Image (cartoon, coloured by chain):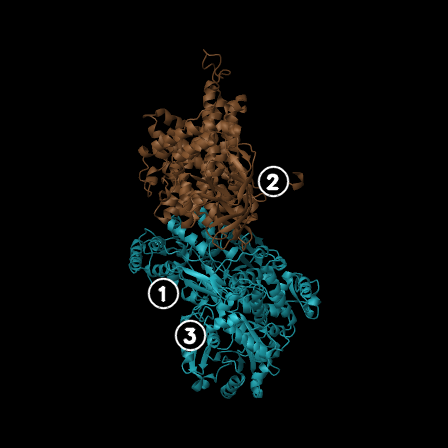
Amino acid sequence: MPAYAAPLRDMRFVLNEFADIRRLQALPGCAEMQPDLVDPVLEEAAKLCQEVLFPLNRSGDEEGCLIENGVVRTPKGFPEAYAAFRDGGWAALACDPAYGGQGLPKAVSVLFEEMMCSANLSFGMYPGLSHGAYSALSKHGTDELKDRYLPKLVSGEWTGTMCLTEPQCGTDLGLIRTRAEPNGDGSYSITGNKIFISAGEHDLAENILHLVLAKLPDAPPGTRGISLFLVPKFLPTDDGRPGARNALSCTSIEHKMGIKASATCAMSFDGATGWLVGRPHKGLSAMFTMMNAARLSVGVQGLGLAEVSYQNAVSYAKDRLQGRALNGAAEPDKPADPILVHPDVRRMLLTMRAGIEGCRALAMLTAIEQDVATRHPDPAEREAADDYVQLMTPIIKSFLTDMGWEATATGMQVLGGHGYIREWGMEQFVRDARIAQIYEGTNGIQALDLVGRKLGAHGGRYLRRFFHPVLAFIEAKGDDERMAEFILPLGKAFGRLQQCTAEVARRGLGDPFEAGAAASDYLRLFALTALAHTWARMAEVALDRQAGEEAGFYRAKLATARFFMQRLLPETGALSAAIMAGGATMREFEDAAF
Amino acid sequence: MPAEGTTAPRAGETTGAPMVETEARAVSAPAGRAAGGTGRIAKVGVIGAGVMGAGIAAHCANAGVEVVLLDLVAGAAARAVQTMGRADPAPFMHKGAARLITAGDLADGLPLLADCDWIVEAIIERPDSKRALYAQLDAVRRPGSVVSSNTSTIPLAALLEGASENFRRDFLVTHFFNPPRYMRLLEVVTGPDTRPEALATITEFSDRALGKTVIPCKDRPGFIANRIGGMWIQSAINHAQDLRLSIEEADAVMGRPLGIPKTGVFGLLDLVGLDLMPHVASSMKASLPADDAYVLGMRDNALIARLIAEGRTGRKGGKGGFYTRTKDEAGTSLKRAIDLWTGEDRAEEKPVLESLEAGRKDLRKLVAHPDRGGRYARAVLLDTLGYAASLVPEVADDLASVDAAMRLGYNWTYGPFELADRLGPANLASMLREAGRPVPPVLERVGAGSFYREEAGRLQVFGLDGEYRDVSRPEGVLLLADIKRGAKPLARNGAASLWDIGEGVACLEFHTKMNALDPEVMALIGKAVAMGTKGAFRALVIHNEGENFSVGANIGLALFAANIAAWGEIEGLVEAGQKALRALRHAPFPVVGAPSGMALGGGCEVLLHCDAVQAHSETYMGLVEVGVGLIPGWGGCTTMLRRWAEAPRAPKGPMPPVAKAFEMISTAQVAKSAFEAREMLLLRPTDGITMNRDRLLADAKRRALSMVEGYQPPEPKPIRLPGASGRAALRMAVDQQAALGRATPHDIVVCEHLATALTGGKRDHTEETTEEELLRLERQSFMALLKTPATLARVEHMLETGRPLRN
């Protein structure tokens, strides 16, 4: 049976030691973000995840969800676990105190999110979607809608969904057919079919709030004609209880590779009553504000699964005795050495670890900038932070979920045949991790978002928020001999990234195909360079502390940093060569030959 | 005022700088020299000091001739001259021009006309008033002087009723467009008795001195441009109402896809005044046959009548027209648009039509699109192009004249026959047939062919006789477009080309977006210098036929590079630019710049490095880098210092040139004409000015050839600069401006760096500073500024809004 212990030490490291915690504490409402306040929250969160959610992970996977007459039943134990989640106030963690939230910054909630994803990703889907609905509604809803619905989402009594996809449109939302007709009383009548709706129907909460993209009768064609509507499963009564059943239903749930305990629903809206959220025809941009947050959360799903897989791979590698170390027996008194002694096993484990810890740090940086972007009193600071978030969103979503898939597959590999069978739980992580590369905008779309939208925005201003501080860091540490082993490779990767950025931008101007052909490799090059920056910064922190208390922790940090610089970062050379080679080979391949 | 000039310049309203039409396919009348030579025009009289008369007077003064401006209303002419001194866009090209005008009253001023060579009448559009005036003129004017009317509606024959034999011989119609300085079209109508020499004299003067393209027209109502343009406006209004388009949609469809200024039709009416509409309609109705398609399409428009009654006659009235601007409670400006159907104002909306997307590049796709935008485009084009085709030979004998009139008089990118070619004449004919409309003979006749074609490298136009003929150019006109047709460049890259323009002269052409300068342009300049040094040509002209010579360096490229911290690359580019321009300056052959339109920033610096400049009068030069938080980095500071140091009448000593250059660059002054550029020493006193854009290249080429013999490139010379003490003085001046609230925080930073670059940095004024050192200082200051967030914000703001950021 797999095990999970929340990596609290490393989480505290990224929050308190690696990130600029003072930047967070300077924000309104964040002054108390001190370890003595945050640590107990993280410990409680760890307890919930380890003791309540994780034990349901495998059984939930085996059992899956069931639908009968439009009623969806989640696996055994899920309703009780959700009750514990709700009663513990966890839904309110990062919500606005005005609606009953606890107002914790993203920098803290992102750590809780990671734990939930490690412990039970399927379960995490339900509150995750609710939080997305909360974000969209709190940013774009009228006061009346907010007063009526937000407290219910914050308390966790009701959950939410995002209804975008339809049978004929996934990535290309311009093709949406769901219609919204005004009823004349300020409400709208919504008609259409939606598919792949996570948490669309379940037995965890008494009401479900659907945020639905639909077209008004006078809508312009394409994506500029989409509006966003709030459509509750039960129309609330005046005293805020679920009232009459709305004209919508779940017609089926999907059978899928992973996250089986998450109900993925086909929804039918048959003249359901809804209310406009945001301005007419501006639904996509309203949806995008929550999609950016959601994409960061999906990135963290990859991170969470990689972490739990790593923990189990390590314990297996320490226990499993097979063969002898290549340079002579390590534990001659035993029948064989633990497989941990084998270089390839160490390679696999260190690759996982370097990816996980680097990504955790990168996610933390982005989370803090999200907090700055929403809370800082100075608009210029907010803009700069938002620029950074805009830039890093596709990188986090894509790279962290790729890392999650690669790491869980590697973790499975460490266990050999035992990784492949269900009993050890390792194959479930692989299956669960796979969806994160697909939903919330496929990773290919993320790469296009990076090269197509983010690179050129405001003459490249988003890029400034990464390139200038990283160059400043490289220049500032250039004379520090202790840092040379980290700064030199970072500088090299940075130069490659600069060169490829200029080249991708230049080629993309005249020929969008070229930008598209470079996109995925470019995103990965960017992510590795960003990771190199976080690793160099983490190494700097660790250098000063390796002799003190917890020396082991910091020495391991340094060793992982070295592994990353020497063994993983060189991939940037290959990526840069591939990018510079251009897209001709893809363009010229004859369609008929595929 | 008479219903004059139904258009105004296409741009200028947003940039503050007026622009001129640039299409190179201009056609001018044969100069008619054969008829007996041309007389000289040294003095012009203009009667009527309204918008048109005053504007014509101002423009004649721009051409450097003496002008008498008279008005019936006492003092009106003098007031008009005064008002024009402050008007924007400016009717005068420079302050001195106003002094060439003698303003007077008609009551006692007639004797002032006695020695005028040309008298232009621009009074109220009433035949009796005009005839009465002509009788008075006939009494005072000198024999052989030419009289012309600026009428747009009255037949020439009607004007001449009862006129003397001599008057009839010396009379013609010269129809200017508003504003006369900027609009390049001049429609000319002669009567049966008009002396050929009178026409030749006016044509010659209008072409060379006033810079107009003269199009001979038949004596028909509205001549060419207003006849077709009026029909277009009427059709565009009617169909927009019938097809229930919003005015934003209508303007978007009419604008860019058709090559019409982006004001479209409703925006255009707001610009020229809605009240013009009924005037034009009634005069056309009175003078055209009742079965003319224009007259048949007329209807009483209740909405326009209401707007006029409410005083909403357009932008000039201050109450707006179809579009209005209001402010909400928070004081934010709101743009509103009227609904054609309900007549109510609502918030302006960006039009979204599939046809607009589909038709962005292909006019055929636009008119074939089934949505209301496509149907609208089709309906208006069928009306307008069908009508234009039916008017040949009624209004003009050749198609090229009709196209030129619409390009130059309405700022269309394509005339009606060029638009027909873009649709395909056969396609247009079949659409007309489908709609049950008559197909004009010329359209039948051209059949499956096109109205224009290229034959052996020459542009030819279809004639009424079914033959193609070369599109004629007036004598001495040299167009790069003609040279390029069928020719191969001597050298070329994605940003610039080098052409052989004959007699051993090469022409370097920029062709980037807005002719922004990028590394490729600099590379081609370098290549041209190398080729010329090896003897590939004797002299070089730098010229292009774009709307603007160059709007400056490609700051988008620089911003992107700065954002990814590619500092080494950027500095390399600055240095490469400096090297290329220095090489140009010291090349062993003469280099002549020939700009028209904007020549800003780097574009101005290119010209500062030329041995001579032959500028179109409508050239707007300036070193505007501080607007984006930078300083000139391609030798602009250095060359301006030298200009002022070597100016004959400028005060001597190291400080005055620095102070002059500093004042000009730190305030981003832009010359609003070539004459102003001369006053600012952006042009040298020896640099030439050409009034007619079509003659610019020929003049520049002649200039270049004249310099070949015994050409010696200038030697690099050190310059004595005031150093730290000079910088301190400039600093004090800046502090003063800051104290007065005239300098923003970042202005001060920019000025500091500019002062360093101009004063020679830390050097003492006893030492001389070499050119290399000065260029190094320019580079250093440029790079330092580019690294400041405030400069990056300025660059970004300029790119996104087209306006400077005051931070």
In this view, the mark in front (2 or 1): 2
| In the depicted structure, whether residue B315 falls above or below residue B142 | above
Q: Determine the secondary structure under disc 1.
A: loop
In whole angstroms, how far apart are the C-alphas of marks 3 and 2?
66 Å
Q: Report, in whole angstroms, how far the alpha carbon at label 1 lies from the one at label 3.
A: 25 Å
Q: Amino acid at mark 2?
A: Thr
Q: Colour of chain A?
A: brown
Q: Amino acid at mark 1?
A: Ala
The residue that label 3 is drawn on is B98
3 vs 2, front mark:
2
Quarter of the image with the C terminus of chain B in it: bottom left
Q: In front here: B651 or A460?
A: A460
Distance in Å between CA atoms under marks 2 and 1? 64 Å
Residue type of the residue flagged with mark 3: Ala
Mark 2 vs mark 1: tell me if same chain: no
Q: Nearer the viewer, residue B705 or B657?
A: B657
Give the chain letter at badge 1. Answer: B
Location of mark 1 (residue): B650
Q: Quadrant of residue B758?
A: bottom left
